[in-house]
Amino acid sequence: MPKNSRACLLAALLSAVAVCGGDAVARVFPFGPRHRAVNDLANQFVPFHAHLWDLLRGRADGGLLLDWRAGWGTSFLPDYGTYLSSPFAPLVALFPRADVEYAVYAITVLKTAVAAAAMTFLLRRLGPGAWWWAAVLGASYALCGWSLAEGAYNPMWLDGLIAFPLLCLVGEWVREGRRPLLGPLVVAVCWVANFYTAYMATLGAALVLLARLAATDSFRARTLGRAAVTAGTGVDLAAPVLLPVLLGSRHAHPGLVREFAPVAGTDFLARLLPVTYGFATPAAFVCTAVLLLAGAPAFHRGVPGRERWLWPGLCAAVAASMQWGPTHLLWHAFATPNGSPYRQTFVLSGVLVLTAWTALAHGRPDRRAVAGGTAVVLALALGALPSPVLTPWALLLAGAGLAAVAAALLLPRRGRYGALAALLVTGTLLGQASATTAYADRERLVRLDDYPPLGAEQERRAAALAAADGWPAYRTDPGLPRVAGNDPLLLGGQGAAYYSSHTPAVLTATLDALGGGWTSRGRNLLGLDNPVTDALFGVGARWRDGRVVRTETFLPPVTVRPPGPPPVYGRSPFRNQELLLGSRVYEAPHAGACRVGTEVFLWAPDATGPARLGEREVRLLGGRPKRRAAMVSLGFQRTPGLRPSLPGPLPGSGALGCLDHDRLRTAVTALRARAATSVEVTPSGLRAVLPPGGGTAVVAAPRLAGWHCEGAEPTAYGGLLAVPLGDGRTELACSFRPPGLRAGLAVGAAAGLVLLLRVRPGSFLRRRRAAAG
């Protein structure tokens, strides 16, 4: 086997062993009883991969452009481009749907292994050195702290971990004037796979290219121009996905706006060591072998003078840029992230690995260089001592690893000594990376939100929802208690619950007006269990109290409302529901109690704690701006004068609503007389047959930007999609095209044409010259 292939395979194997070994030590899924269902891994990534499974198997409600399951009908292409456009994501279809968590874990490990192989290939391409050293350094990059602590539960980011060495390789092709077709294609694949981390990887690769040009005396304006054209063409090729994602973000409910505050320098240094954790600090750990070698070039006589300071200087510059506000914003596309503020840390790890390889590519470091690199690591550890992030295990493993790597570098090269050196360095990597993985596994479960793992109960619930499904005649809501933020995608059915970076602002505002609840400052929408909204949005079945409950008071997905202005919402969600329904169905309580026979609903969006009416108790979780409690039912009023007990004072006179179900049935019956007689939904729209008479057709879906309807411009009716009908019109046909898709296709096609025009003439001339020769 060629040494390049051998090195790449070894790096991939080391990475997989370290990740799986660390998870096994921590007894975390799939190697033990502790689950991995934390934060966005449970809320977004697993449910979105489950939905991708349904799409690939032809079982989804909707298609690539439109998702009919979550959020009462939302744009899907921006979500696809954000969470699922990785070339590895379709592998989920190889697993049973019930094993989607296993599939996501396997894809996570595979991405880590591919990142190790990609970096190893790049190192071998950049200069000479022992093949096993390239494998260890490549695996060290893939097993950096960012990968183990952040990428492990944000697997979409791991595509950026792969992208950085690939884009550095493209930079080498640009520098040498080679592969003008393949270079932009690689850029395009990286940006489509995950544009967010690909942006950071591109910045990092640009810095590496500049360092390579400066180190090799090949700094030419023509080279920089070629690099810009290559990167620009590749990004333009990805425009059919990128532009809808960009515009989807602009139409999304705004997230948290944060001011960047750099962490203490001691914490920054501590995170370079193994077995440390901190959600708001940079996970900068790389194997001690990398740190020692990255500190060695300045003391290495074999390294040319310019490179002795160029590469360590680049490491220092990247580290400093992470702590300065303007460059922090540059790394994150000029928006401080809502969450971990050091998402570019993998680039620092990559630059450290490249610097370490520089120390090996110019000859094995001598004693002076090893001593200098060791002193650098000791100085970093000494500076980290005051940090509360530092753990005793961090110092122990760092010290042991430093001694092992220094000994390996000083051993003779040949025979059994060479094998012993390889074992010492490989053991250091596996020990430190596995321990860091295990520590991060344990800390995540303690510090981050966690959710129920998938199991027999969720499978039973999904099967019951599938059996009750009647879409598009009616919706089947996955109900409560919720498993994750995207239960309709995970469990099936069609509901209001939805969590994404692209949660539409109109959807949040509409659900808010109708009494809905949310977390994550309005981007994680909770399902709303309410008979009026169930009627309005056609929910004919829902999961409640451990079983599927059916109701007859639901409307078809399309109804016709009489001519007139659309409803204008006010402060009361009870009144807003009535405005959208067109009938009064709630009564006000008398002396704090509802009339016997009515259903008591409580709206206390900022309350947290138990609320009770008689023997029925519900728990509220509110408190804006982060959370908002949904309107909840306290049950039917059975006893005259019985008042609810709340977790605090009554929020106001409009906090209680008494629903008269007889009035609701009457209102639904009246609206059904003017509802669509048939509705057909497609992966990108719907068609409906309507009764004659004119008015306004109202679709039980949010009025998103991107809807187009035949014969009329769609409008909004209480936040829902609406189309004015002319006299005699009895058909409705609407299609959805995400904003930016048409422009993205045009830009991508133009970039493809430019690329062909650039490449084909050159290829033709080369063939002519070869034939003439």
Image: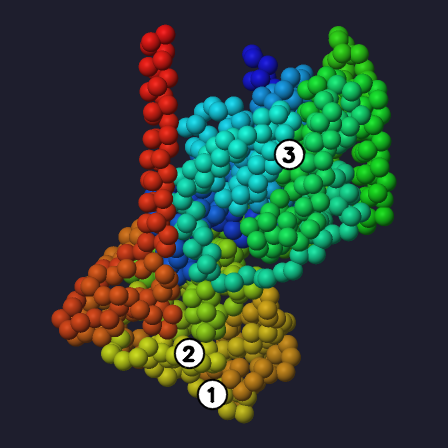
Q: Is residue 426 left or right of residue 671?
A: right
Q: Is residue 684 visible?
A: yes
Q: What whole-number distance in Å separates the C-alpha atoms at marks 1 and 2?
A: 18 Å
Secondary structure beneath label 1? loop
Residue 64 in the image: x percent, y percent? 36, 47
Q: How many marks?
A: 3
Q: Amino acid at mark 1?
A: Ala
Q: Which residue has dot 3 on it?
A: 350
Q: Is residue 171 left or right of residue 704?
A: right
In the image, is residue 247 above or below residue 182? below
In the image, is residue 312 above or below residue 522? above
Q: Quadrant of the N terminus?
A: top right
Q: Earlier in the sequence, mark 1 or mark 2?
A: 2
Q: Which residue has dot 2 on it?
A: 569
Q: What whole-number distance in Å separates the C-alpha atoms at marks 3 and 2?
A: 53 Å
Foreground label between 3 and 1: 3
Instruction: Name the mark on residue 588.
Output: 1
Q: Earlier in the sequence, mark 3 or mark 2?
A: 3
Q: Amino acid at mark 3?
A: Gly
In the image, is residue 227 above or below residue 301? below
Q: Quadrant of residue 642?
A: bottom right
Q: Is residue 431 visible?
A: no
Q: Quadrant of residue 429?
A: top right
Q: Amino acid at mark 2?
A: Tyr
Q: Earlier in the sequence, mark 3 or mark 1?
A: 3
Q: What whole-number distance in Å separates the C-alpha atoms at marks 3 and 1?
A: 64 Å
